[in-house]
Image (cartoon, rainbow, N blue to C red):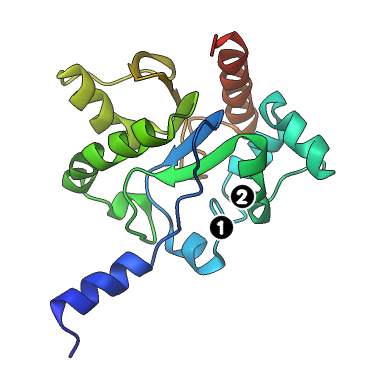
Amino acid sequence: MASISSRARDAAAFTLPDLVRTDLDVIFVGINPSSFSVAEGHYFARKTNRFWPAFSRSVLSLEAREALGVARLEPAHDRALLDHGFGFTDAVKRASPRATDILPAELAAAVEGLVAKLEQYRPRIACFHGIMAYRHVHRALTRTRTDPVLGAQPLRLGSTRLFLVPNPSPANAHFTPADQAEWYDRLASALHTDGR
């Protein structure tokens, strides 16, 4: 039988590595990596996830698509996007079949580490996918119990602006793929108006 420490080490190894470096334009922050994405080795790897189609429809990805010579970005492009100003991480690094498997206590416990990571790498904007991923950060920074609204947030982490878009999961039926692309267009506008 495996010891507790070896089980913890095995669980920690079953995740996606952060794709981050200093001074990116955007670091996308998901809730946690899906088990499927970890098995595939790429962010938002499930074909039904709307991130890659919506991001590809958006003006936000135009320069990266042109530089890579593709009309549509795919999960296999996640590492290449570092060279075009985009990175990826998660609020909680523990993989699970569904984001709803992540407990609120895990999200709350992850805030300090996530904030430290964003302060270390200093992206122009940290873009959170969904209120579930951002709620605990918002509450810790504002010291309120209010929920945030989509769009540019009134808070900063040092020089990093915070932005909230809908979760691209197909389970989020409140937003269509076109809506999701429009939120990435709004993020592009926020980058354009950023004075940094």
- Type of amino acid under label 2: Asp
Query: Residue 97 or 13: which is nearer the viewer?
Result: 13
Residue pictured at 50% horizontal, 23% vertical: 124
Residue 42 tag number? 1
Residue pictured at 57% horizontal, 56% vertical: 45
Q: Please state the horizontal and vertical placement of residue 183, each as a whole percent of the image.
A: 57, 23
Query: Residue 85 or 38: which is nearer the viewer?
Result: 85
Residue found at the very far right of the displayed protein: 69
Q: Quadrant of the N terminus?
A: bottom left
- Looking at marks 1 and 2 on the same chain, the residue that comes earlier in the sequence is marked by 1
Residue 119: quadrant of the picture:
top left
Q: Which residue is mark 2?
A: 78
The reply to whether dot 1 and dot 2 touch (C-beta < 8 Å) is: yes
- The 10 Å Cα crowd at callout 2, few under 14, some 14 to 19, many 20 or more, is some
Label 2 element class: loop
Residue pictured at 22% horizontal, 78% vertical: 6
Image-based side of 85 in relation to 29, left or right: right
